[in-house]
Amino acid sequence: MSESSVNEVRQYVLFSLCGEEYGLPIAAVRSVIRFEDPTPVPHAPAGVEGVFNLRGQILPLVDLGRQLRGAAIEPTALSRIIVAEAGVGSVGLAVDRVHEVASIPVDQVRPAPAAALTTEMGEAFEGVATYGDRLVILLDPDKALPKPVLASSGAIQEGELDA
């Protein structure tokens, strides 16, 4: 391991989802906004709640609770939408609450235990890190939001994938 990788620190936006704490790389996060009810999209796959308007851009809203935990979030005054960039372009991620931006040393990130994850969702996780006295599950935005799910929702139109 080189000296630069030993001292490397990455920043993550930390958020709560169904009682667990998760992190997304800050480089993938465009903004965080208050939760707003989306406009439903007929025949959208599970997890895609509909679309919402962000400063003139229509984006799909994915319920990360449903996507990762199988249980929809219950929006409150603390609920937020994380607008993130993934392989499919911009997408809104509904979460219970956004906490903070955290700097986590790369050498503190450990692989998620294989026995705790399904094979298909195991790829969605970058790893698990200890931050203070908490365990944080770090997500890979490109793998946590599979392209076929969003593209088939009808929320993203042809030509918008490179936006």
Image (cartoon, helix red, strand yellow):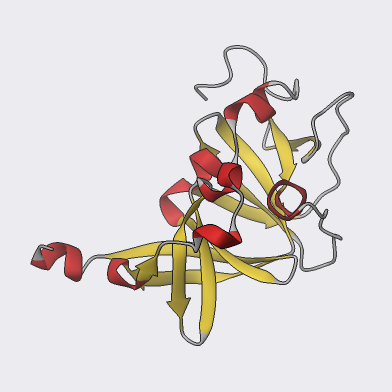
Q: Image point 82% across, 55% down: which residue?
A: 71
Establish if 69 lies above or below 28: below
Establish if 98 lies above or below 65: below
Q: Residue furthest top?
A: 158
Q: Image point 80% across, 37% down: which residue?
A: 46
Image position, residue 117 (x, y; %): 59, 56
112, 85: nearer the viewer: 112
Q: Image point 60% across, 39% down: which residue?
A: 145
Q: Is residue 28 left or right of residue 55?
A: left
Q: Image point 53% across, 64% down: which residue?
A: 137
Establish if 23 lies above or below 123: below
Image position, residue 163 (x, y; %): 52, 25
Q: Quadrant of residue 90?
A: top right
Q: How many marks?
A: 0
Q: Residue furthest front?
A: 115
Image position, residue 146 (x, y; %): 59, 34
Image position, residue 73 (x, y; %): 81, 58
Establish if 119 lies above or below 115: above
19, 85: nearer the viewer: 19
Q: Is residue 7 left or right of residue 66?
A: left
Quarter of the N terminus within the rendering: bottom left
Q: Is residue 160 left or right of residue 46?
A: left
Q: Residue furthest bottom?
A: 133
